[in-house]
Amino acid sequence: MSTIKKIGVLTGGGDCSGLNAVINGITKTAINKYDLEVIGYIKGYSGLYKNEFIPLNLKAVSGIMHEGGTILKSSNRDNLFNYYMKQPDGSVVHKDVSDVAIENMKKENVDALVIIGGDGTLTSARDFHRKGIKVVGVPKTIDNDLPATDMTFGYNTSLENIVDALDKIHTTAYSHERVMVVEVMGRNTGWLALEGGIAGSADVILIPEIPYDLLKVKAKVDEREARGKNFTVIVVSEGATQVGGGVVIRETIEDSADTQRLGGVGEVLTRELAALMPYKEVRNTNLAYLQRGGIASQFDREIGLRFGVHAVDCLMTNRNGVMVRYEGRDVNEVDLEKVVGKGVTGETSKGGAKYVDPNGQIVHAAKSIGISFGD
């Protein structure tokens, strides 16, 4: 039998729909099935370091399943193993303050943690487990780029947001006979652009896994014009690059685990296409944080809830140091050591992320119906 009596929950990294469903599943399973006490740390690892938390009881999680974001709030700037600290003289040092977090857990009699987040958040989860803390990780990202799981919650809702936006973009593109460039998130992977673009009837999809040739993008627009299709919708992933070029970086944030923030490739592409095609109006729309928000889809509510339930079951059966995952139609778990920094599944995996296979079935289907990837 497990000796766990009290668990802590935190959500790290960017927000997404489905987080509250996970918190709901964790809390209700812990209380109803195991008679545990549950607390939620505020703003991710920041709350664990500062010992800021709220009690999670049945009332606290009532009616939150559909809500986007996280009732615990979140932060992606607090790596407790390399914590960014400003000194009185204005200089900056990085310190390992993980022991402070562990002492806070002991002070509050917290026996284990359920940590919900992406690659950076789960890397710290692994590191806490290495220091003897009972941990279960729950994978979260709208980018769907985490290895070892077929799907992450938040991704499905983001796709719905993208498709809804593309449906609206189409009407103005058609009415004004314009080239409309729509930038979406995804970091260094193209899942959002690819699957959102296909469902949203994009004519061109540009993803990081397939560097594009600007002249071939122009050729696709011209080909459509020749067929009487006097408008074109282009979906571009924020990490897409031209052949021989690099990513467009929006800003650098020194105290973040992910210091380089991508963004702006849509604006660059729009300017360059406009220069090549003075006979066409080219407009840019960046969906940005609209992709993260909104009411969670049915899939994200269900899989989030099941992740939360399974996370607690793992802890209470002494299966810790693992990440829950969606495999086939089942929820099971895999060792964090096999996930963090690894590329263990996906159409193509490398460098710790799950990448789109340029020669895979989804890209093949898109090309078969005439979608251009600029290659």
Image (cartoon, helix red, strand yellow):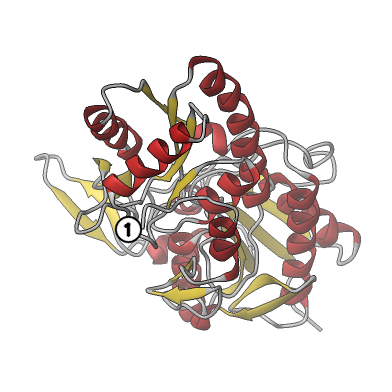
User: Residue tagged by mark 1?
Assistant: 211
Taking the spot 18% from the left edge, 54% from the top edge, the residue there is 93
Between 100 and 182, the residue placed more toward the observer is: 182
Residue 282, image x, y percentages: 36, 25
Give residue 100's position: percent from left, percent from top. Answer: 41, 60
* Any part of residue 106 in sight: no
Q: Going by the picture, which residue comes out furthest to the right?
A: 32
Residue 8 position, x and y percent, is: 64, 58
Quarter location, residue 106 = bottom right
Name the amino acid type tagged 1. Answer: Pro
Residue 37 in sight from this viewpoint: yes
Q: Is residue 294 above or below residue 42?
A: above
Q: Secondary structure at mark 1?
A: loop
Quadrant of the frame with the C terminus: bottom left
Q: Is residue 228 above or below residue 58?
A: above
The quadrant of the rendering that contains the N terminus is bottom right
Tell me: residue 291, above or below residue 92.
Answer: above
| Left or right, residue 226 beside residue 33 | left
Please state if 298 lies on the left or on the right of 245 as rendered. right
Residue 54 occupies quadrant = top right
Left or right of 155 in this view: 280: left
The residue at 36%/51% (across/down) is 239
**What is the total number of numbered labels drawn onto the structure image?**
1
Is 139 positioned to the left or the right of 179 in the image?
right
Query: Where does the image place residue 46, in percent across and percent down from the top left?
Result: 45, 48
